[in-house]
Amino acid sequence: MPLTPNQQIGPYTLIRPLGEGGFGVVWLAERRGLITTQVALKMPRDRSDAIVQEVTQEAQVWQQASGHPNVLPVIECAIYDGHVVIVSEYVADGTLADWFARCEGRATPIEEAVRITDGILAGLEHLHRLEITHRDLKPANVMLQGNMPRLTDFGLARGKAIGQTQSITGSLHYMAPEMFSGDYSPQSDLWAAGVILYELLTGRLPFPQERVEMLIPAIVGSEPAAMPAAIPAGLRRVVERALVKKPEGRWRSAAEMRAALVAGVSEAVSTPPSEHAARRERVALLYKRDAEPDERVLRLLEESLESRGHAVFIDQHLAVGIEWAREIERQIRDADAVVPLISAASIQSEMLAYELKIAQEALLREGKPRLLPVRVRFAGRLSGELGEILNRVHYASWSGPEDDGRLTAEIGAAVERTAQPAAAAPAPKPMEAVGGAVNLDSSYWIVRPTEMQFRDAIARGDSIVLLKGARQMGKTSLLARGLQQARAAGALCIRTDFQKLNAESLESVTDLFQGVIEVIADQLDVDYDPQRDWNPRRGANVNLERFLRRLVLADPTVRVMWALDEVDRLFSYPYASEVFGLFRSWHNERSLDPTGPWSRLTLAIAYATEAHLFITDVNQSPFNVGTRLVLEDLTPGQVSELNGRYGAPLRSDEEERGFYRLLNGQPYLTQRGLSEMASRHIGFDDLRRGAAHEEGIFGDHLRRFLVLLVRDPELCDAMRLVLAGRPGISAETFYKLRSAGVLSGESAAEARPRCQLYADYLRAHLG
């Protein structure tokens, strides 16, 4: 039976198809819970075992590639109701193919073309570093999320099998010549990126033939049509080398092609105006639909501006709907100039007033677009919102056909006066302080797969979400992002950091719960006095529950997320099992009464220590139920991405590998090292030589670990055994050292220093 809207597939409700191909259908779907989340479901038509295996393989490759900002994250691969599905994030802005369709054969402005291509190449650089070749890079497989291109659809992606013979698969217009013989390599992906850049810069394909018998010979044996001279020579060279027939003649890597792309833009900026065509401007024409002579003037200006080489946007080419409204706003904000047609009909248009308000906000915030109003057989002072925006703005006028030539010349000249020389690259953002929670808007936050799983658990409204990781792994920062997500979806959010409670608040379970209640009451600004409202006859657990039910969970329409950070601090107290047993009871209540208040509560618990060492009764522990997530160290690809965000102080792949061997992706050390290199302008060799020294970059951090060890002879002896490569440390000691972040490994038998830096420093000081 065919799938239909509103059909349930496992936990997902189908909304509408997003795209369809020979393999199957991609659906927009919703997962309803604490937060209703929209996702994209890729579903093959065939349900055979072979297809299930193929889809699973795609999901595995996709999951491996996830975690980079230019790769769309995959959420899960599962079989629901007999359907195998790959679930990924939904991007409402559409694909690069949709972008090209809206352009209708018009070239993309150079700055935008370069930005899109650079993002694609950044994604390819990440894939190739993981030894993954995409093999089906095309506009339909590039999502545009705001200003960020994101690669998707890894059905043909392969790892390591470079040069392996395969059947001809992929989208023909973007396939490199060698792929028609069944061969491929990372350079095959760079060919596809070159085709996309050609299409962005020219508005057409380099090999536009539609019939297969003509297209394949053209790709294999013919050269693409020459690009217009108005395109800077540096960018033409990027495309030309990407489209060399032999793979070995193309760019050696995506990183090299990216560098050439940036150099091509710099060359275009530094070229004197006499040596290249005038800058192409983006112009949005605003008007009242179905009004004359407005439509006639609209066509006149559109043809005139396009003949001058400018990109003109008119919303007439879009179907009305949600996407229509989003695209109008984006086009106005991105425009260099906005030309509203002011007439007796248009001044009554609420839509025109709304569009001008968007333009004015963008102008005040970003310095563009410039407003160039045209009065069409209309005189007099404007009132209301239109008057506030336009009355002080110089305008052109049109009274009849005799004004055609004058108007087009005036508007053309005014648009081109907005074309200022391209600004120099903005100064690098000030370095953020390294250590503690990472700001929500930080440029240096790397999204890891665990974050996507955490966000999905919050969106589902899971009762307990466990976030485990050693010190300085980013648990607090991730909790903050989960709270931000829940808050944006309308949930009530509270947070308790147990490290901030004073010793008096931890003396008994009563003191603890009273302290917690005071913290929550302050956050919610509710009137609660523990001395007045606490009833000692009911016991500590009942008092906390009554507070939560009556003041936190009182509204049956509102969900609540409670983030509990550093709960390890409670493990050593005699009442720990009672506290965590209470949390577990709320999870059980939720199962017994799905409509009760506890069904609206999500506990997100962050911790580092092995809970089972302190809570022995599994029936009293929340740590063996709910969603369990572990924060891992950064991968080599993620370290490389972070290096790029710091301006690439690691100058080569070899330096990146050496940096990774030294720190093994430990998040704090990685960020600290890159920040210091970038801000102090030191090279990797200098960093490596002084890394384990007392007065080096990491000196304070390393001394803290040394103090931790020498205070406890048992830990000190265990660490000496590990450094000597000898077995014999106890499981409990291993877990303590691992939660502190000194060791890694799955068990005491596999214990090893967390990174080479720790090993070098501790060998020198433990003797």
Image (tube, helix red, strand yellow):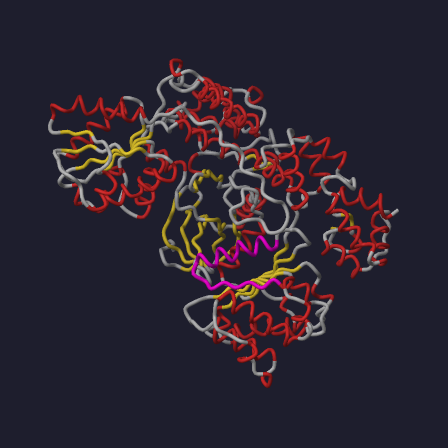
- Quarter of the picture containing the N terminus is bottom left
Confirm whether residue 51 shows in the render. Answer: no
Q: Choose between 110 and 168: the one closer to the eye.
A: 110
Q: Position of residue 226 (x, y in %)?
A: 40, 16
Q: Residue at x 25, y 32 (%)?
A: 372
Q: Give the x, y percent position of residue 35.
A: 45, 60
Does the segment drawn in magenta span residue 480?
A: yes
Q: Quadrant of residue 295?
A: top left
**In the orientation shown, which residue stands out farthest toward the right?**
767
Q: Residue at x 46, y 59 (%)?
A: 487
How many numbered marks does the figure carry?
0
Q: Is 348 positioned to the left or the right of 338 in the image?
A: left
Q: Does 251 appear above or below 540? A: above
Residue 686 image point, x, y percent: 73, 31
Q: Residue furthest top?
A: 274
Task: Please tell me whether the stretch drawn in magenta is mainly helix, strand or loop.
Answer: helix
* Residue 366 visible (yes or no): yes
Considering every residue shown, the one lying at the far bottom of the view is 537
Establish if 225 lies above or below 543.
above
Q: Is residue 270 magenta?
A: no
Relative to 194, is 292 above or below?
A: below
Q: Residue at x 43, y 67 (%)?
A: 558
Out of 479 and 396, give the one closest to the viewer.
Answer: 396
In this view, the residue in front, 365 or 224, is: 365
Does residue 707 appear left or right of residue 164 in this picture?
right
Q: Position of residue 467 (x, y in %)?
A: 61, 58
Q: Is residue 502 above or below residue 508?
A: above
Q: Which residues are magenta?
A: 475-497
| Horizontal arrangement in the rendering, residue 430 relative to residue 333 (left or right) | right
Res. 208 image quadrant: top left
